[in-house]
Structure formats: C-alpha cells, structure tokens
Image: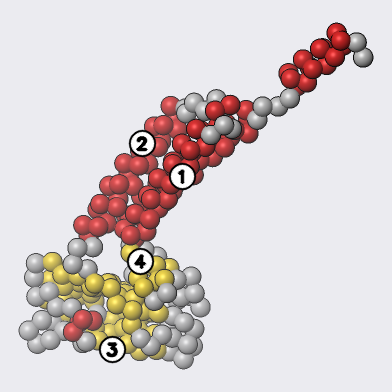
Amino acid sequence: MSSGEAAVSQKWQRKGKPKGKGEGTGRAAGYDMAGVGLLLLAAAAGWSDMVLLVFGHVVSGWVLCVVLVCAAVVAAGLRALWLRSEAGRTVEHSRSALMSGLRVVAATAAVLSCAAGALDELGAEYYVLHPTGPDGCTAVVRETSFLVLGSGDVYAIGASHIGWRPSGSWIADDGHRPIAAGTYELGRHEDGGGSLTVHGTPGDPIVSGGLATLDCGS
C-alpha cells in the first residue's frame, strides 16, 4: 500500500470511528430522567397516606419522600461526575428547556411534599399491634391529637409490607389515644385478617368511628 493510500485509509478510519456521542448523550439524559422520576415519586409519597413496614419498623410517607429526594440528589451527583470524566467531556450534554423546567417543578413539588408531610407528622405515634394474623396480616396504627381531639388510623399490611390507605379511622374526645392507653381490642380471624375496636373512657369517649375491619387482601 502506498503512502497516499495509507493516509486516505487512516483518515477514513478516524472519520468512521464512532465517538459514542449518542451513547454518551443518552447516558446523561438517563441520569436526568432518573432524577426527575425520583423527585416525582417523592412528591407522591409525601402527599400520600401510605406507610411501609420494614423489619417491624414503620416508615411514613414523608420519610420515604426524604429518602427519594436524597436518591435524586445522588443521581444528579453521578451525572455531574460523569460529565467531568474523560468520557463525559467528549459528548454534547446540553439539557433541554423542557427537561430543566420539569426538573425545577419536580424538585419544588418534592420539597413542599416532604415539608407538608413532616408538619403533619408532628406529635404522631405509630404502633405495630400484635398478634399478627395467620396469613401475616399486621395492624399498624397511627395516633395523633390536635387541640381537644385525638384521631387514629389503622392500616392492614400484608406480604407487600405497604399500607396504601387506612382500613379504618376514629376520633376521640379530649385528645384521647386509645392505642397508647390500651383501651382497644384486636381480634383475629382464622382465615386471615381481623378487626380492631377502640374504646374511649367515660370522660373521653370515641365520637366517630371505633371499629375497623382488617383485610390484607389474601
């Protein structure tokens, strides 16, 4: 091969060799989408009534919100580190106006959601009641009080370890908390599930609710 042919061949190889532009741009976009997705999930978790049961401990929605926001921050950090790496500097990584706007909206919603959830949890106490059902169905109670009223929610949590919404609620007079006071009855059914009945006192009666059916969907 002549020197001229070799030069043409080398030039063609340099032009034809892929630089990973599409792959690199896609990777940066992937970090962006992961971060926005985590922020949107955080916003949903903070505003929801869901609870998680993890190794016998209750994780409320606002705590999950904070965890997801932290995960989004990690995703943003990984994106920044990758863009500063040798591979990241070789590609174009401009962020679209739509993605930037969506990121701001998602971050704002997530922060507000976490803050609102944290405020709502002030003074709240969680209880994991025993015994559990034969199918593993567990009753988890959230009790709180505000001014002269006490309120409570009970969740029936099964194998998924997630309580999406309360199975029952109650309101008691004068800030009474029947679970904390021990004025309740937890019944279990042989085929799974059960019921929770809360009682007041002569001076602090239950003014609304008081009986909840526990069904974990088994």
Please give the label number shown on residue 59. Answer: 4
Q: Give the vertical position of 140 relative to 16 (above or below).
A: below
Q: Earlier in the sequence, mark 4 or mark 2?
A: 4
Q: Earlier in the sequence, mark 1 or mark 2?
A: 1
Mark 1–mark 4 distance (CA, rounded to whole Å):
23 Å
SS at mark 1? helix
Q: Are marks 4 and 2 in contact (CB under 8 Å)?
A: no
Residue for point 34% across, 47% down: 110
Q: Earlier in the sequence, mark 3 or mark 1?
A: 1
Mark 3–mark 4 distance (CA, rounded to whole Å):
24 Å
| Kind of residue at badge 2 | Val
| Kind of residue at badge 4 | Val
Q: Nearer the viewer, mark 2 or mark 3?
A: 2
Instruction: Read off the residue under disc 3.
Output: 185
Please give the label number shown on residue 75. Answer: 1
Quarter residue 76 falls in: top left
User: Relative to the observer, which residue lies in front, 28 or 105?
Assistant: 28
Q: Earlier in the sequence, mark 2 or mark 3?
A: 2
| Left or right side of 194 for 126 | left
The total number of labels drawn is 4
Instruction: Read off the residue under disc 2.
Output: 104
